[in-house]
Structures are given as structure tokens and as C-alpha cells.
Amino acid sequence: MNKNSWLHNIGVIARREMSRLAHQPVYFFCMIFAPIFSMVFFLTLMSDGLPTNLPIAVVDQDNSANSRKIIRQLDAFEQSKVVLTTTSFEEARKEVQKGNLYGIFLIPRDFGTDAASGRQPKLSFYTNSTYLVASSLLFRDMKTMSVLAGASVGLQTGKARGLTDDQIMAQLQPIQIDTHIIGNPWLNYSVYLNNTILPGIIQLLIFLVTVYSIGTELKYGTSREWLGLGNQSITVSLLGKLLPQTIIFMLISVLCAVSLYGFSDFPLNSGWGPMLSALFLLVIASQAVGVFMIGIIPTLRMGLSTASLFGMVSFSIVGFSFPVLAMSPAMQGLSYLFPLRHYFLIYVDQALNGRALHYSIDQYLWLAAFLILPFIVGKHLKNAMLHFKYIP
């Protein structure tokens, strides 16, 4: 087959595929509506970066000027909102059990008196770790408030003893801590989550659409017609079918990048080129994995089930929520079989850290290596296209 001939055949198959895409609503839903809805939903849901005004209770058994000052300061924290002030711990506990509150801050009796006399009163706080994010944020606020309260008491006691501010600070904080948070210094939950979950959703949808578009050809007996348009070449047939999908998913991916790095102004320290290249490789690598799935199991039901399972596992194994280095060696090795893992590493190096491009070359090569998969199953898939009989 000469070059002009296979280019012509790819064009014919691509036009046929565009007609199929236009006349089946499932493609519009999976390729356009679902990813755009996900972008709007997640970016709107976490537009503030972190949850704010999380409801807590303060059990104030001291009821002094000092305790009321602590309550006002705790309420001033962005993540915490004191919605209940009571002297009964039982009342606060019941509200937490009902799910109306995420934490309790307990100020004991004679707190101010005991603190001034050096008897070391205890500030207690309770968080409901059933809600992991809310609990972590409130724990941070309550612990910070406890440290500040202790420092305030220490400052007053030191001044009463006639010490200077420098002498007091040397006792309160003998070691100064210099903290540097890289990548996401704002502790913005949207930066942490959306830069991986949105490409992950796109990857999952590519798996499903690729498997569905080939699987329906097998199910409804149109695969021979499709292969004939490619002059019996599985390579030409796949290129023609996947080309329109590649263009649409790439446009959606660019829209995703614009939403993240343009509209939301998330970190993009190495510029647009590295991330757009990574997104393009993620798209075609995901299509290659989809072809591999339906090539190994040329049945629509099983192919879609495999694509769904593989896509969902990607969210857990890529390392953005639970670190890969903390997994078992077998799971660490398994993580490299997921395109999203390599995209995530490129995102960390290029968008967040702004490292030189050569540090990420191996991840780009990993994504490109997934293109080998269709060639592995090409013969098996072609046999299925020619001889497969669908059994309801």
C-alpha cells in the first residue's frame, strides 16, 4: 500500500467515524459533556482552595476574659467557625455524633488562674476523623490556638517576673523553626487535587470511548466493513478510527489546561509547552491502552468492565493521594503501568517545581512507550474483527 493510498483510507475511515460520533449521543456525553462538567464541578467546588468555616463547638468551663479571648481568636481562623459555645461537654459531644459539628475545643475550669500560677492547665480538643480533610484542618487550627494561648500566658508571666521580651521569647521558643513549603505553599486543596483528578477523568473516558467504539464494531458486525475501508490493514483502520477521537480529546485536554493554568492561575513554572506535550502523550497513550484492552478481551461488556476498573485504580496508584514510595515494592512497580502515573510525575516536575525538561524525559518516554501496546494485540484484534460472532 503506497503512502497516498493509506492516507486516503485513513481519511475515509475518519469521516466514517465522525459520522458515528455525531449520530450516537453516548459519544457526546463521554467526550464533551462529562469532562467539561467535571471541570466546572470540581473547580467550582474547591474555588476557595480549602474548606472554610467548618463548624466546631467550644466547651468553655472557665468563662473568663481569657477564655472568651481564646474563643474569639479561634473563630477568627479561616477554617474554623465557632457555632456553639457551652459549658456542657455532653451537649457538644451529641452535636458531633449527629454530624452537625466536626470538633470540640475544651477550656477547663480555672484555666486563667491555673495558667497564671504555673499549674499547667490542659486545653483539650477533639476532632471527628471520619471526615479526614475537615478533621486535619481543624486539628491544625486548634493546635495552633493552643500554642498561641500557651505563649500568651508565658508572655504575661514573664513580664510579671520582670523579664525582657527577648528573654521571654528565648524561653518560649528556644529553637526557631524556618519552614519552606514547596510546590503548593498556599496548601490549596484544589491545586493538590484537580491537577491530577481532571486528567484522570479524561484518561478514564478515553479508555471507555476507545473500547466502546471498537467493541460496538465487533458487537454489531460492522468490523469487516471497517477493516475493508482500511484495505485489510489493522494499523490503517485503527488510525482512521482514533484520529477524530484524538483531536476531540486533545481539544478537551487543552481546555482543561486553560481552566487549570489560565482561569484558575495554578502554578505553571515551566510554561505551557511541557504540559501540553504531556497531555497529548496522555491522550494517545490512553487510547493505546484502550486498544490493548479490547484486543485482549474482544467483547464489549468485558472490555468496558476492564477499562472502568483500570481507570478507577489509576486514581489510587498514581501517588497523588497515597505516596507510591510508601507502597509495597510490587505495587510501586505496578504503578508504572498506568499512563496517569507518568503524567503526574511530569506535572510535579514541570508545572509545580519548574525543573529542567531533561529531568522528565524518562516519563515522556514511558508515555510514548504505551504506543507499542496496539501492535502487541494487533493480530488478535484483526482476527476478532474478521471472525468474531457476538453471543447475546
Image (cartoon, rainbow, N blue to C red):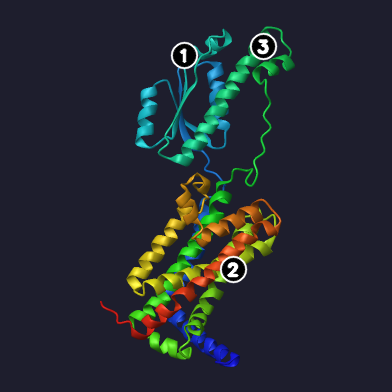
- Residue type at numbered disc 1: Arg
For residue 224, above or below residue 262: below
Q: Is 7 placed left or right of 375 in the picture?
A: right
The label shown at residue 280 is 2
- Residue type at numbered disc 2: Phe
Residues at marks 2 and 1, CA–CA distance in whole angstroms: 63 Å
Which of pointers 1 and 3 indicates the residue nearer the eye?
3
Pick whichever of labels 2 and 1 is earlier in the sequence. 1
Residue 182 sits in quarter? top right
Mark 2, other Cα within 10 Å: few <14 / some 14–19 / many ≥20: some
Pick whichever of labels 1 and 3 is earlier in the sequence. 1
The label shown at residue 158 is 3
Mark 3, other Cα within 10 Å: few <14 / some 14–19 / many ≥20: some
User: Which quarter shows the C terminus?
Assistant: bottom left
Q: Is 144 placed left or right of 313 in the picture?
A: right
Is residue 266 in sight in this rendering? no
